[in-house]
Amino acid sequence: MGIDKCPGRLLIVCPALFQRFYDATFPVEVDHVHFTPINKTPLEYAKELKQQYHQKRWYKVATLMEDGSAPSPYPLFKLKDILASCSTVFASKGKCCRNRPISPNTKHWYKRVYKRAGSILRYLCSNLPSKIFNIMSSTVLKPRLEKAKRLANEAYGDQQYNWATYTGDISNCYDELVHDRILEAVQFWCKAIPALLGRRRTDRFSVNKYNRKICVMGNDNTGGDYITITIATLMEICKFDCENSVLQVRGKLYRRKLGAPMGGYLSAFYAMLTFAYREFTTLYPTFEKLALPGWMGRYLDDVIAAIAYKDQKQLVQIQEFIQWLGSHGAYEEPLVLNVEPEGDQEFLEAKVYHENMELWARLHNKVTKDFMARLPPYRRRLPDRDSTPKAEQIKLVASTMTRIRQLTKPDVSMLQCLIDLKLETEAAGYASQIFLRAARSQWLSTSNVLKEEEKELFVLSTQCSLDVAIGNYTTP
């Protein structure tokens, strides 16, 4: 079976041990809070779904998957829990052998209907207001931190100040989503987003037939390239999805009473919109009351806070705010934000640092970290040389260079990241020319032109030998 965030890697588990973890991850027979049995055979249930599809006239939204089937869930184990001892993980997290409860909806009968509805939810998420924590990509991390620094400089002028940085994750954010709160949030943003975009109101959205990432407010005016879905129909689909999230375990069907499936087409959007609603109404106004310069961001269930302070009194205010944010009431029970201790923080694929008044981020290369520690290459971003054509190797290395530029300030941090990448290409067995040609492709790019300070750093990284890179490596 696969390993979380480790594409191409396989985990071999004793069948008896796997069954024990499977039953603990999907306790459908004993967990009456999250699951309830469906007293129908899979064939009977499929027939009922097809009848409802026609009764609800969802054929106007998308076609039915006639040969669909119920999701068969599986646990996807986390790499960090595989590598570390159970006692180490338990001491840190309060449990061990953690995994993600995946319930893939790739063969669901309503797959195409849910994907069309998901286009609208994606549109809502992409247009959420600034007065929430939601971000859609790690590429905004560098500019948001730079803006936080400008705000701190404006607020404190010539006074000395420091940064307090925290990260956390909303535990079990899929399993513990309350259906009524999901629907309330979707309904709220369907009404709020048009107003925020300068439209008085709209009662429908139109989704492109050929590209579900393209969605517009109102009717289709292109002559047939879009499917128009009213908000009433969207809410009907979301309500049905919440109340009929089905999974098949040992040949029997069960329905979720609480939560959304990790693997559902709408689940991530439900989480983002539900959290955004809570932030818009409660959390962001509380953050504003601190009246301290800084920034808070959230990518799905991962949260980061970077707040500047100039004295102990302000630091205590920040600590009290973070403590409240990690309480059971902030994101509303049963959800809770687990907050890491203050300090330099890992957030998504970056690491955020602070020292005195400085605040910055850089790409956090865990592959190189493992390589330099002489650990087996469990985490791999670059596939092995023998399985990858040279043109693809260059493309992969160049794309990582782009990520470095998006996340990292063009100073010594960027140079360190580029040297880390050079070490990573060595770990993958790539020829030294691959890194050089990838850097050249960045240099010659007309769509994403290198800045002058970046050019100097790229030149230095290509001139740095592997021996020098290894000799000067410092663990990030």
Image (cartoon, rainbow, N blue to C red):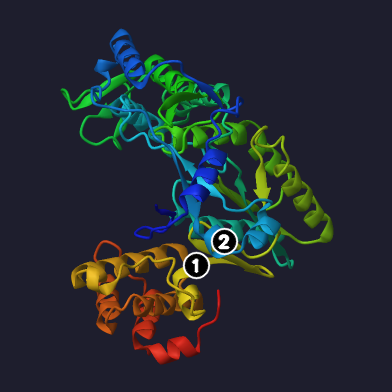
Q: Quadrant of residue 347?
A: bottom right
Quadrant of image for the C terminus = bottom right
Front one among 472 and 173: 173
Residue 360, x across and y down, in percent = 56, 66
Q: Image height check: is 11 above or below 462?
A: above
- The extreme right residue here reads 313
Image point (30%, 63%), residue name: 448
Q: In which quarter of the image is residue 184?
A: top right
Q: Image height check: is 403 above or below 386?
A: above
Image point (58%, 27%), residue name: 178
Q: Looking at the image, can residue 33 be seen?
A: yes
Q: Which of marks 2 and 1 is nearer the N terminus?
A: 2
Under circle 2, the secondary element is strand
Task: Classify residue 89 as left or right of residue 223.
Answer: right
- The extreme front residue here reads 16
Residue 277, x across and y down, in percent = 57, 31
- The circle drawn on residue 346 is 2
- The circle drawn on residue 376 is none
Q: Does the CB distance between marks 2 and 1 fall below 8 Å?
A: yes
Front one among 436 and 467: 467
Q: Image height check: is 2 above or below 132?
A: below
Q: Where is mark 1, residue-wise?
A: 364
